[in-house]
Image (cartoon, coloured by chain):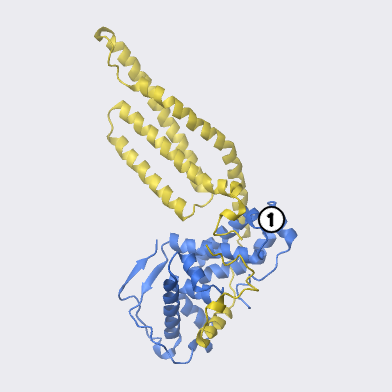
């Protein structure tokens, strides 16, 4: 993409290929003569507070990020195991079925509780990032809205789910979506610290 | 070229270096130096003081956080100005203020004398703020910031003809708004309107 700031604007005249008639030139002169404005109040204190807050959030993010990845990996490995526990016994003799089934249901409930607690923690983390973190750009915002829609859909399915296995599946989906949403909110930090200087076509020079 | 947004100031390399090291004091110096320029540019592009304030803060914050991406190949002020323009156009898209009016008119050549040559600043500013968002932003980028149609089209993610038609209509509308005998309402947007993504 052509970047108009890859040159010195004081030396390069972009208008050389773009001739303007005298009327247009006079409109330009009139607009340029408009006096500069200023914000109604001094905005620096707010700006400084925002910078400090962002610094604090960034530190928190870098402490949280490894933990978040670890939690995500742990969940990924633990999930099949959990799924086996939650599955209803099929080849258990009838005589022993009742206590085993009860034990499995209890385990499933405990696991369900753990999933719900985990979902709450992820949600709180995402909300904190959303509130205090970097603003998302247009593309990220679209992705965030799509993820939020999917979370809303999962919530709707959860409200109708009766089967413990389905419920657990849905809670896990919810957690995964929240993790994706959280990582989306972290992208500006990853970009700011990791991306090479010339990779952002909008602002690089 | 004199510009009211005053992004032609030179920023000392050591001040930029301090900013790149994340020094808040350096950031304050730069912020204060460009606050009015950035705010004015944001206001001209968005047409709203509250949005301009948001643009100013978001763009300045990006300048602070991405200062290390600035490689010094162009004036720092120009880099900062680019951030402000990007942020303002993003706000226009995000807030869906960015309504592109379709005028029910023909773009006949107007031979009457240019009314802006005799308009005072307040009248000119009022007329500017009555333009649709896209038209006003294109007009400002073209006439004041020195963008050409290709560059404007890239900024908006639209075609060159979009830029040209918005400019032509903005110019015509400015003429209508500033001509005393036509200051009785001119009705735009009778065909419909579209909103950019």
- Name the spot of residue B110 as percent of width and height, x first: 42, 89
Q: Colour of chain B?
A: blue
Which residue is painted at 41% across and 26% down in the image?
Answer: A79
The chain under label 1 reads B
From this viewpoint, is residue A53 visible? no
Q: Residue furthest top?
A: A95
Q: In the rendered image of this protein, does residue B90 appear above or below residue B116?
A: above
Quick check: A163 left or right of B144?
left
Q: Nearer the viewer, residue B162 or A67?
A: B162
Q: Is residue A61 left or right of residue B9?
A: left
Q: Residue beneath label 1, please? A: B19
Q: Position of residue A66 (x, y in %)?
A: 56, 34
User: Secondary structure under badge 1?
Assistant: helix
Q: Callout 1: 10 Å neighbours few (<14), some, many (20+)?
A: many
- Quadrant where the image shows the C terminus of chain A: bottom right
Residue B174, quarter of picture: bottom left
Q: Which chain shows up in yellow?
A: A
- In this picture, is A26 found above or below A104? below
Up-down relation of residue A93 to residue A25 (above or below): above
Quarter of the image where one finds residue B103: bottom left
Residue at x-position 61% and y-position 41%: A59
Residue that protrudes farthest toward the left in the picture: A94
Q: Position of residue A132 (x, y in %)?
A: 53, 47
Q: Could you tell me how many numbered marks the image carries?
A: 1
**In this view of the protein, can residue B176 be seen by the observer?**
yes
């Amino acid at each position: 993409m052509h970047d108009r700031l890859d040159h010195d604007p004081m030396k390069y005249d972009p208008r050389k290929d773009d001739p303007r008639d005298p009327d247009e030139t006079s409109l330009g002169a009139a607009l340029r003569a408009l006096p500069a404005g200023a914000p109604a109040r001094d905005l620096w204190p707010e700006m400084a507070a925002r910078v400090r807050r962002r610094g604090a959030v960034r530190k928190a993010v870098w402490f949280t990020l490894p933990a978040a990845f670890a939690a995500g990996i742990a969940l990924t490995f633990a999930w099949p195991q959990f799924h086996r526990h939650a599955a209803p016994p099929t080849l258990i003799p009838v005589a022993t079925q009742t206590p085993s089934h009860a034990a499995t249901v209890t385990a499933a409930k405990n696991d369900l509780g753990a999933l719900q607690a985990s979902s709450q923690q992820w949600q709180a983390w995402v909300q904190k990032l959303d509130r205090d973190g970097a603003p998302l750009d247009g593309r990220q915002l679209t992705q965030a809205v799509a993820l939020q829609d999917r979370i809303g859909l999962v919530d709707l399915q959860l409200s109708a789910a009766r089967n413990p296995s389905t419920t657990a599946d849905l809670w896990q989906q919810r957690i995964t979506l929240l993790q994706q949403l959280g990582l989306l909110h972290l992208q500006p930090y990853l970009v700011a610290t990791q991306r090479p200087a010339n990779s952002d076509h909008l602002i690089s020079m | 070229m004199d510009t009211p947004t005053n992004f032609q100031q030179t920023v000392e390399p050591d001040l930029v270096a301090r900013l790149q090291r994340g020094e808040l004091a350096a950031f304050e110096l730069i912020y204060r130096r460009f606050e009015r320029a950035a705010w004015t540019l944001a206001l001209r592009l968005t047409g709203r003081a509250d949005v301009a304030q948001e643009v100013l803060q978001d763009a300045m914050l990006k300048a602070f956080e991405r200062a290390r991406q600035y490689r010094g190949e162009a004036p720092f002020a120009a880099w900062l100005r680019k951030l402000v323009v990007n942020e303002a156009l993003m706000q226009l898209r995000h807030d869906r203020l960015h309504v592109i009016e379709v005028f029910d008119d023909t773009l006949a050549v107007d031979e009457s004398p240019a009314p802006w040559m005799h308009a005072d600043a307040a009248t000119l500013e009022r007329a500017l703020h009555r333009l649709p968002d896209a038209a006003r932003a294109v007009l400002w980028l073209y006439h004041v910031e020195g963008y050409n149609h290709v560059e404007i089209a890239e900024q908006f993610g639209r075609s060159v003809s979009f830029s040209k038609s918005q400019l032509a209509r903005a110019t015509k509308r400015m003429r209508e708004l500033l001509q005393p005998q036509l200051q009785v309402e001119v009705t735009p947007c009778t065909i419909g309107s579209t909103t950019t993504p």
